[in-house]
C-alpha cells in the first residue's frame, strides 16, 4: 500500500514542475473525492519518480550526501528521494505567498474519502521546511506566509 501526497494551489503549477523528476498529475477520475479537502482550485497528486509518495521525506540527522557506509544502489536511491523531497519543498515554498496559501494532504491509497484527523497551519515566514518537513497521513496542512 502506498502513501499519496496532494497539494492544492491558488495558481496552476508551472510547466517546469511537470518536467522535473517528480511525478505530478492533476487530480481527476477516482481521486476526485480528495478535492473536497481543498479550498484551493488546483489540486495535484505529487509523487516521486516511482509514481507514489512513499519515498518523500527528510530524516532528521541524515543526509545521503554525507553517508558513505551504504552500498551504492541504496545510497543513490536515498539521494534521489532526498532531491525529490527538496523539489516538493521548493514547489510548496514557491507557490506560497502572502496572498496564496498552499494546501498539503497525505493519505494511503484508497483512503481518499476518509476525513482529515488534524488540520494545521504552518507559516513559512517562521518555519524552515527543510529542517521541519514531515509527512503525516490524514493531516491537512495549510502553508501560509505572513
Image (cartoon, rainbow, N blue to C red):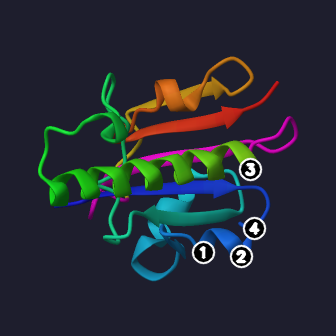
Residue drawn at point x = 48 percent, y = 65 percent? 45
- The residue carrying pointer 2 sits among few (fewer than 14), some (14 to 19) or many (20 or more) residues within 10 Å by Cα, namely few
Q: CA distance from mark 3 to mark 4?
A: 9 Å
Rendering coords of residue 59 (x, y %): 31, 31
The answer to whether residue 106 is left or right of residue 88 is left
Sequence-wise, the earlier of marks 1 and 3 is 1
Sequence-wise, the earlier of marks 2 and 3 is 2
User: What residue would you read off at disc 2?
Assistant: 15
User: What residue would you read off at disc 3?
Assistant: 95
User: What residue would you read off at disc 4?
Assistant: 12
- The residue carrying pointer 1 sits among few (fewer than 14), some (14 to 19) or many (20 or more) residues within 10 Å by Cα, namely few
Sequence-wise, the earlier of marks 3 and 4 is 4
Does the segment drawn in magenta span residue 25? no
Q: Which residues are magenta?
A: 96-112
- On residue 18, which mark appears? 1
Rendering coords of residue 114 (x, y %): 34, 50
- The residue carrying pointer 3 sits among few (fewer than 14), some (14 to 19) or many (20 or more) residues within 10 Å by Cα, namely many
* Residues tagged 4 and 2 counted as in contact (Cβ below 8 A): no
Amino acid at each position: 500500500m502506498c502513501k499519496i501526497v496532494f497539494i492544492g494551489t491558488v495558481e496552476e503549477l508551472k510547466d517546469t514542475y511537470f518536467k522535473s523528476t517528480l511525478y505530478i498529475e492533476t487530480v481527476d477520475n477516482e481521486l476526485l473525492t480528495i478535492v473536497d479537502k481543498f479550498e484551493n482550485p488546483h489540486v495535484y497528486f505529487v509523487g516521486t519518480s516511482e509514481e507514489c509518495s512513499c519515498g518523500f521525506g527528510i530524516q532528521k540527522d541524515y543526509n545521503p550526501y554525507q553517508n558513505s557506509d551504504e552500498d551504492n544502489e541504496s545510497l543513490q536511491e536515498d539521494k534521489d528521494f532526498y532531491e525529490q523531497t527538496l523539489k516538493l519543498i521548493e514547489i510548496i515554498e514557491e507557490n506560497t505567498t502572502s496572498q496564496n496559501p498552499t494546501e498539503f494532504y497525505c493519505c494511503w491509497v484508497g483512503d481518499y474519502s476518509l476525513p482529515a484527523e488534524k488540520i494545521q497551519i504552518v507559516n513559512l515566514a517562521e518555519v524552515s521546511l527543510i529542517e521541519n518537513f514531515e509527512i503525516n497521513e490524514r493531516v491537512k496542512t495549510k502553508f501560509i506566509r505572513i
